[in-house]
Image (tube, helix red, strand yellow):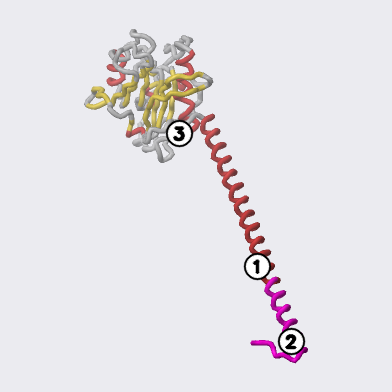
Amino acid sequence: MDHNVMPLPGYQPPPEPNIDHLVLEDGEPVESIFAEKLYRLLTETLYSSWPGPGGDRPFLVVANVGLFWDLHEPPLVPDVMLSLDVPAERDLSQKKNNSYLLWEMRKPPDVVIEIVSDRRGGEDSHKKHDYARLGIKYYVIFDPKNRLRQGVLRAFSLRGGVYKPLKRFWFKSAGLGVMLWQGTFEKHRARWLRWCDERGNPIPTGRERAENERGRAESEALRAENERERAENECERAESERKRAESERERANAAEERIRQLHEQLRAAGVEPPE
């Protein structure tokens, strides 16, 4: 039920289901250091630098967290999932908030990303089927070593209950896309999967954003310093012009004084100076 809608008189919400039997954490480690770093790259960037889908709408992005869709079925565990209009601020001391329980979140995630580590993960088969069945609108398969021989990066949109390939890795309803990026993250250079804006610019990590802002501040300081030096040079040029004009005026005054003296000398000798 929408929390913003007033319930009918006498309406009693159904009791919360008992989830004591659900195993929300199995303690399994991540597959590799690369995967662990990639999880962080795909989650930290959004919380650090993405304003969200607009209109102050909240979002939740998590990695390697169980997606429970039925009380009596094992969860799906996407490598990364993004869900719009789901607040990230939740009381994590409560068991129900430590996994993505579909009946608690009241909607499926909007984007799911799977990272291929071997050919047994089912990214192209049962996982794709399961995510489509849950109504997840966008599905991404990142296969860094092309183990499935279908390309390093593929993305799909759900249409008519079936995933159709996207030529452009842009998720319009989410206001976000994905891209391949060759670079260094946490001292490890590789080809990474990253979120991007509509122009194909990667969403920066918190560190990148800080470095960009510092670079802009330094550029602004340099521009201000150049403006100051230019102003000083203009002042010096103006002062030089003033001094030159003053020298010209003094020379003109001296010449006039010399002519006056010559005229006086001529008159003293009885000669009328020429006009």
Q: Which amino acid lies under the numbered mark 1 shown in the image of this protein?
A: Ala
Q: Secondary structure at mark 2?
A: helix
Q: Residue 117 magenta-drawn?
A: no
Q: Residue 45 in the image: x percent, y percent?
A: 47, 28
Instruction: Provide the residue designation for mark 3.
Output: 50
The one of 87 and 131 positioned closer to us in this rendering: 131
**Sequence-earlier tag: 1 or 2:** 1
10 Å crowding of disc 3: few (<14), some (14-19), many (20+): some
Can you say which quadrant of the picture contains the C terminus? Answer: bottom right
The mark lying in front, picked from 3 and 2, is 2
Query: Could you tell me which residue is drawn at 61 percent across and 47 percent down?
Result: 225
Instruction: Provide the residue designation for mark 1.
Output: 245
**Relative to residue 217, is residue 263 drawn left or right?**
right
Q: Which amino acid lies under the numbered mark 3 shown in the image of this protein?
A: Trp
Q: Secondary structure at mark 3?
A: loop
10 Å crowding of disc 1: few (<14), some (14-19), many (20+): few
